[in-house]
Amino acid sequence: MIDWTAFGVSLKLAALTAAILLPAGLGLARVLAFRVRTGKALLEALIALPLVLPPTVLGFYLLVSFGDASPLGRLWTALFGHPLAFSFSGLLAASVIVNLPFAVQPMQRALEALPPDVREAAWVSGLSPWRTFLRIELPLAWPGVLSAFALTFAHTMGEFGVVLMVGGNIPGQTRTAALAIYDRTQAFDTAAAGAMSALLLALSIAAIAVVYGLTGRTGRRHA
């Protein structure tokens, strides 16, 4: 039997993670694409770190940072009356950090692919930087934004290691679809584990199709 409650937690987590990272990641991507020169490689490396760190290592450091022994954990408990670790709030914070490269990198590449003379022509025409962003940069970089959303959403749905380390496995709160698959496998309920795995597989294939479709369209447009 599929654990729809766990899928609901995953969908909520993925939607909130994408909602936070799309505007924040777009701002960071724009800074990296157009403004940062000194130290850009180091900043890009820090953003990409979740891609290469083992999930358990990243999850351990986040757990330590969110725990009651840390200043952040104590402050959170004092303000909200519950711990940050092993809560949905902590799980969301960890998910935002883990998915940062999946959101920033596609949008940064899309912005960097814009011809410089397009932005310069907008400025010469009297558009402010903000109006240039809204009317010129964002429409042209829209495939990168959609790719960032697809990758962030799909990766959040399937994340396991960091979710287990930071959120635990609390039913209805932090038990996601990936953790439910693990539980079903441990209980030798291969039918339920297979059904939930098939749903996540279909979601991953759809996300990859969106990304490659948008990438191909963007490449043909700039060819």
Image (spheres, helix red, strand yellow):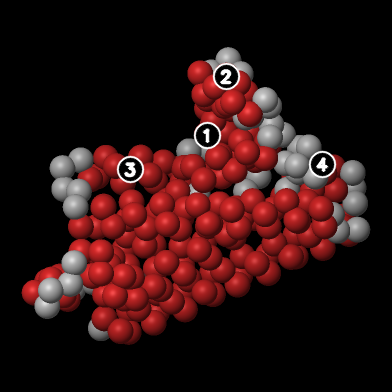
Q: In front here: 122 or 188?
A: 122
User: Can you tell which quarter of the image residue 174 is in?
Assistant: top right
- Spatial separation of the CA atoms under disc 2 and disc 1: 20 Å
Residue 45, numbered label: 3
Instruction: Give the mark toward the camera: 4 or 3.
Output: 4
User: Can you tell which quarter of the image residue 113 is in?
Assistant: bottom left
Label 4 amino acid?
Answer: Pro
10 Å neighbourhood of mark 1: few (<14), some, or many (≥20)?
many
Name the residue tied to disc 1: 58
Q: Is residue 180 left or right of residue 217?
A: right
Q: Is residue 53 left or right of residue 35?
A: right
10 Å neighbourhood of mark 4: few (<14), some, or many (≥20)?
few
- Spatial separation of the CA atoms under disc 3 and disc 1: 15 Å
Element under label 3?
helix
Label 2 amino acid?
Answer: Arg
Label 3 amino acid?
Answer: Ala
What is the quadrant of the C terminus in the image?
Answer: bottom left
Name the residue tied to disc 2: 74
Q: Is residue 153 above or below residue 146?
A: above
Residue shown at the point (60%, 72%) measured from the top left: 206
Residue 153, numbered label: none
Name the residue tied to disc 4: 171
Q: Residue furthest left?
A: 124
Residue shown at the point (79%, 48%) measured from the top left: 180
Q: Which numbered disc, 4 or 3, marks the residue that appears first in the sequence?
A: 3
Q: Which numbered disc, 4 or 1, marks the residue that appears first in the sequence?
A: 1
Count of numbered badges drawn on the protein: 4
